[in-house]
Amino acid sequence: MTSMNSSVNLGDVIFTFIFIGLILIAVLSFTLFIRTFLKNQQSSIQNSQNIEQKLDRIITLLESEKEENIH
């Protein structure tokens, strides 16, 4: 009877380790998801700023061209 009791305890220990491992994997996955999301958001902001600068440059060139055609 003692050997059966220890095998149940071993099963409980294995189950507990697997459960803790799954929790750690879930936390790690969530952390990596947030990091990737924030990195992509920063990249998107930088791309938007670059596009805005290029559009400002185009507007400036068009306005200067328009002024040259008027004179």
Image (cartoon, rainbow, N blue to C red):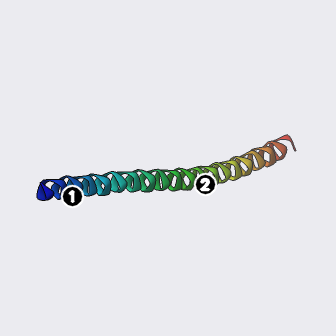
User: What amino acid type is highlighted by mark number 1?
Assistant: Leu
Q: Quick one: label 2, few (<14), some, or many (20+) residues within 10 Å?
A: few
Image spot of residue 33 (x, y percent): 47, 51
Residue at left offset 55%, top offset 56%: 39
In front of the other: 48 or 3: 3
In front of the other: 12 or 52: 12
**32 left or right, relative to 2:** right
Name the residue carrying label 2.
Answer: 42
Name the residue carrying label 1.
Answer: 10
Image spot of residue 26 (x, y percent): 41, 50
Instruction: Find residue 27 and name its label.
Output: none
In front of the other: 41 or 34: 34
**26 left or right, relative to 46:** left
* Quadrant where the N terminus is found in the figure: bottom left
Q: Using the numbered discs, state the Cα–Cα distance from disc 1 to disc 2 in whole angstroms.
A: 48 Å
For the residues carrying marks 1 and 2, which lies nearer the camera in this image? 1
Say what secondary structure mark 2 lies in: helix
* Quadrant where the C terminus is found in the figure: top right
Q: Quick one: label 1, few (<14), some, or many (20+) residues within 10 Å?
A: few
